[in-house]
Amino acid sequence: DSGVTQTPKHLITATGQRVTLRCSPRSGDLSVYWYQQSLDQGLQFLIHYYNGEERAKGNILERFSAQQFPDLHSELNLSSLELGDSALYFCASSVNEVTEAFFGQGTRLTVV
Amino acid sequence: KNEVEQSPQNLTAQEGEFITINCSYSVGISALHWLQQHPGGGIVSLFMLSSGKKKHGRLIATINIQEKHSSLHITASHPRDSAVYICAVKQGAQKLVFGQGTRLTINP
C-alpha cells in the first residue's frame, strides 16, 4: 500500500457526461500529480499541483480540469466525455517536487 | 523518436534467470524512475536514481548519466516478478516522461 488513495476504483459512464476522480495523497505529501494511461498512448503526464497551486501542465485537454484543496486532496474533473477518454487515471504524491513519488492504484474509467 | 526508449518490449524467461531491462533517454533529466505495474493495473515505484546504482532485494538499478542509459536487473527471477516494468525520466521538477514499458513474463 503506497498510502495514496484514489476513488472510485472503477467508473463507467456515457459519452457527454462529466465525472470527478479523487485523490488523497500520502500524509505529509504536498505534491500531487495526475497521469493518464491509455492503451495507445501509454502513461502521460496531465498536471501537477504543489500545496494547492498548479505547477505544471502536460497533455491535459481543455475538457479536463483539476484542483488541489487546502487539505491537500486533489480532484480531476473530466467533462464532455468521449470514448477516447477511456483509460486508467493515476494520481501520485510526493513530499516535494524533487523527492520520489508514490502512485495510487488508479481509477479505471470506461466511457460507453 | 520517443524521448524514453525501453528494450526489450517483451521478455519471457524461465524462473531463476537473470533479467536485464534497458532504458535509454535523449533529454536532460534530474532523476530516473523504475516502476512496476502488475496485471491489476497498480503502479509501484521501485527506484528513483540520479547516479550510480541502487539495490533492493533481488532488484538492482544502475544509471550512466553520460551515456543517458539505465538498466534494471532482476536476479533469481520468480513468476511473481511478472509485470510491466516502466522507465520514467524526470525533466525539471515537475514532469515525468515515460517509456512504453517492458512486459516481463517469468515461467515456472
Image: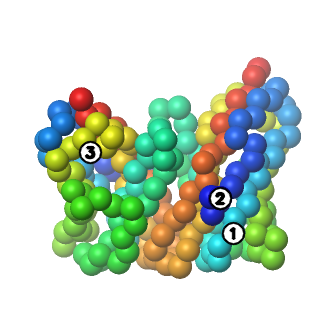
Residue at mark 2: B1
Residue at mark 1: B26
* Residue A99 higher or lower than B17, as above or below: below
- Residue at 55% x, 74% y is B91
Residue A50 drawn at (x, y percent) = 33, 76
The answer for how far apart the CA atoms under marks 3 and 1 are is: 35 Å
The quadrant of the rendering that contains the C terminus of chain A is top left
Which mark, by number, is residue B41?
none
Quarter residue B76 falls in: top right
> Disc 3 or disc 1, which is closer to the eye?
1
- Crowding near the residue tagged with mark 1, few <14, some 14–19, many ≥20 C-alpha atoms within 10 Å: some
Q: Do the residues indicated by labels 3 and 1 lie within the same chain of the protein? A: no
Task: Assess whether mark 1 and mark 2 are in contact (beta carbons under 8 angstroms).
Answer: yes
The answer for how far apart the CA atoms under marks 2 and 3 are is: 35 Å
Query: What's under tag 2, amino acid-wise?
Result: Lys
The answer for how far apart the CA atoms under marks 2 and 1 are is: 9 Å
From this viewpoint, is residue B52 visible? no
Query: Badge 2 sits on which subunit?
Result: B
